[in-house]
Image (cartoon, rainbow, N blue to C red):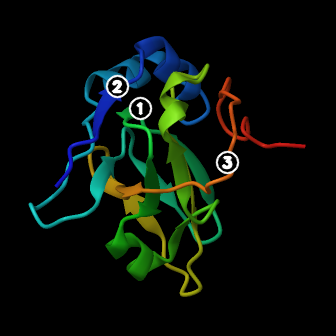
Amino acid sequence: MKRIAAFEKVSAERFLNDSVDICPVLELAKDAYENIKLPKRATKGSAGYDFYAPFDFTLKPGETIKIPTGIRCKMEEGWVLKIYPRSGLGFKYRLQLNNTVGIIDSDYYYSDNEGHIMIKITNDSNENKTVEVQKGQGFAQGIFVEFGITYDDDTTDERNGGFGSTTSN
């Protein structure tokens, strides 16, 4: 297997700024930052790197939350990190990412927001199930995928921002 990436924590300042909505108590957010776990695979045969919740959260059916993971990813060009909900949470609760699949481009690491990976999820349960995720529990997974480009691709633009910053007019 190719080793093509490394996970890192974003700066404390970035995490605290992005956590205000989910955790307005500064001391709790600081504690969450200190205890951020970098994504890991559960077994040597796992494709997905588990992303762990920095805070406890509960989602009733239809509720949505944006999780600041505190994580950024530096990866080689030609690779993308795809983010999905953990299989068990998706199966049991219909936990879904709001953008279906999160796409983390290799140049996102260099964006103005430090490449902070934010994961917005919704409990789409049609069985009236509430999902509870504890701090430190895996709630999403990321899978690295190599990609190609067309022969006539002449793109030279560079990213300067976070979500939606690569949209062309």
The image quarter in which residue 133 lies: bottom left
Say the numbered circle drawn on residue 36: none
Q: How crowded is mark 1: few (under 14 residues within 10 Å), some or many (20 or more)?
A: many
In percent of width and height, residue 67 lies at: 51, 43
Q: Quadrant of the N terminus?
A: bottom left
Residues 126 and 104: in front is: 104
Q: In this view, does 70 lie to the left or right of 113?
A: left
The amino acid pointed to by label 2 is Lys
Look at 59% across and 85% down and name the residue there.
Answer: 126
* Label 1 or label 3, whichever comes before in sequence order: 1
Residue that carries the numbered disc 1 in the rendered image: 72
Check contact, mark 2 vs mark 1: CB within 8 A. Answer: yes
Residue that carries the numbered disc 3 in the rendered image: 153
Q: Is residue 21 left or right of residue 169?
A: left
Residue that carries the numbered disc 2 in the rendered image: 9
SS for dot 1:
strand
The amino acid pointed to by label 1 is Arg
Check contact, mark 3 vs mark 2: CB within 8 A. Answer: no
Q: Residues within 10 Å of mark 3 (few under 14, many from 20)?
A: few
In percent of width and height, residue 16 lies at: 50, 19
